[in-house]
Image: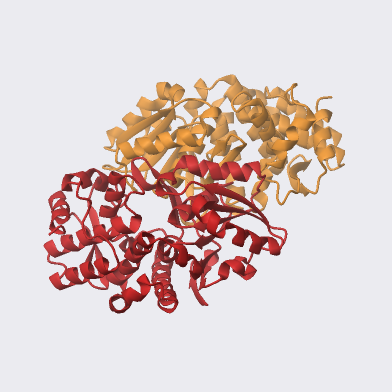
Chain colours: A red, B orange
Amino acid sequence: MEKITVTLGKRSYQITIASGLFEDPLSFLPLKAGNTAMLVTNKTLARLYLNKVRHTLERVDIHVDQVILPDGEQYKNLSVLEQIFTALLENSHGRDTTLIALGGGVIGDLTGFAAASYQRGVRFIQLPTTLLAQVDSSVGGKTAVNHQLGKNMIGAFYQPLSVVVDLTCLQTLPIRELSSGLAEVIKYGIILDAEFFVWLETHINELIDINPVAMAYCIRRCCELKAGVVAADETEQGVRSLLNLGHTYGHAIEAEMGYGNWLHGEAIAAGMMMAAHTALRLNQLSKLDVSRIRTLLIRAGLPVTGPKIMTPDSYLPHIMRDKKVLAGELRLVLPTAIGHAEIYTGLTKETIMSAVLDCQD
Amino acid sequence: MEKITVTLGKRSYQITIASGLFEDPLSFLPLKAGNTAMLVTNKTLARLYLNKVRHTLERVDIHVDQVILPDGEQYKNLSVLEQIFTALLENSHGRDTTLIALGGGVIGDLTGFAAASYQRGVRFIQLPTTLLAQVDSSVGGKTAVNHQLGKNMIGAFYQPLSVVVDLTCLQTLPIRELSSGLAEVIKYGIILDAEFFVWLETHINELIDINPVAMAYCIRRCCELKAGVVAADETEQGVRSLLNLGHTYGHAIEAEMGYGNWLHGEAIAAGMMMAAHTALRLNQLSKLDVSRIRTLLIRAGLPVTGPKIMTPDSYLPHIMRDKKVLAGELRLVLPTAIGHAEIYTGLTKETIMSAVLDCQD
């Protein structure tokens, strides 16, 4: 069993990684007999894991209600959020309830924001079931829903009580979802850890095959890297924004294509290539490094170009609405070497758009 | 000019009280030339004050957009909240924007929660225009929207940058709204300050007449009292819950009658009488004090009984859903003397319902 602590003073919490955790009541501490919890999941995961988790909780006399949401990024909105509140109120859940997010990033983001907002804040536990959620969205307390005009525009910084990663979930994960998670894994290597990037170059096939030893190490390393960044900068005033590598372009792809048509990691993979090409154009990144990034993404089963139907122009309105735009100034996280990234400001629209074409070569 | 500081570490802020503040650019510090702000108000207030505030901001080169919402408690919901997000996104407001709430409690609560949630948190300034908002809802960082099944069930603790109370607003306030504000004023006397209660018994007619000297003192004293409580207990783990005197019954009235039909202060006045009668039943409050509370509420133009059409039974489902119910246990704030209140737990449903009838004698 791997354990990582996210250090945030009173709001510190642990991430536990192992196989079979959903069947162990200890995973759900500090919940105890007599407590009430609301399990939030989607239809697909309900079939696979809901009864298992319910049973584990009920064995130790925790009262469990449940709300089952439709499956997909297009449901990460205020009206689906309201369904969670309705379920909580219909079942008379008080301030002492605990929300349990059983699912990927969509369920985690929705449930986390519901926990942050229900009666101005109740406890919540993350049970991330996708690789993407395990290495990224479940760690760090970013919660949000989408708005028609922009992704993750409505949300809160709100930390869970704990994050429980049961590795057996990955066995049922579709291969596209696995690759999508690997995009965020590769991102950590690019921005923070050259050694880990080399490890990934060596072990990428084992990860695709869900080798449990390789996967446990990979998830632990990503969580450690993210936990370090979050501890240093919880509300993204500085270093945390490096984690947005590829996300400015990526969000434009997701918004333009309609949420859910391109998976988050797929959009981020293409976005990281665009950021790499922007850095190349500005002579901040070597051709060799661009090529290593591209090769690793391809080996992970990820796209390295944007959607064919998107012209460079079509990225711009989305980018201008991005949360990283301050006072109208374009800001972008750019890799400057494998294992290192920086925030660049004052970029021209032309540079940003040219990179979209560049990476299609 | 009266100034009170709400002491909350890094999130400390000032409340300023005077006539004419909306015309003084200094009221809007730390906003400065080149900044962007979104004014949120309702149709009624837009006619009265919007241009004045806009002009003050534009004189010092602050870019102002606006969103005008329908007027009324029934619009304090997630779908109206979404209108604020839409306006922010359509006008490309970034993380560096400032939301300005120009209005009463509904506008303040909606705008505050929008500010807490937009891009996971942007700055906001409160310009409370009703007495209720000036003495209560604008101070302390409670923001929320209603759910069909319960009032203020969705929200956040989120502090403003500053609160600017322009006393001239009270001149255009309907008398029912003024009385509604006085309910919260009287509440502070009952729970925290016997001397202030006596002052109110002496000056209630001047407050009804909006005598500026009496009103300025009254608002300052209420803000001081509330600021003290909030500084001691921001997220309502303890003493802050005393401010909920009358609110458990009051929320039941508001929910049952439909939000907006009974004004908040009217419901709270009746609710405080019910709490007083509960305390009387439990021999925790004297008959004389019950009678002084009743007399002052009547002199302030407030109801001292619940709606005739509501049976005692009809309060119960609302009370069971109240945020103050923990693990199904009924809790109620009860006055134990003029100037003192306590939280009582383990009350029976019968006691709670009997008080509804008692206070109709």
Q: Nearer the viewer, residue A244 or A126?
A: A126
Q: Is residue B214 above or below residue B35?
A: above
Q: Is residue A128 above or below residue B140?
A: below
Q: Quadrant of residue A32?
A: bottom right
Horizontal side, residue B148 vs residue B331: left or right: left
Which quadrant would the C terminus of chain A be assigned to in this image?
bottom left
Q: Is residue B17 among the parts visible in the rendering?
A: no
> How far across and how far down the image is residue A331, in percent?
24, 55
Q: Is residue B69 above or below residue A36?
A: above
Q: Count every numbered label the image shows and give the total.
A: 0
> How far across and how far down the image is residue A147, in percent?
38, 42
> How far across and how far down the image is residue B208, in percent?
62, 23
Please report the residue visible at 76 percent of the width from the left and 28 percent of the height from the top. B294
Please report the residue visible at 64 percent of the width from the left and 34 percent of the height from the top. B185
Q: Quadrant of residue B256?
A: top right
Q: Nearer the viewer, residue A33 or B78?
A: A33
Horizontal side, residue B360 vs residue B17: left or right: right
> How far across and how far down the image is residue B67, in percent?
38, 31
Please report the residue visible at 27 percent of the width from the left and 42 percent of the height from the top. B33
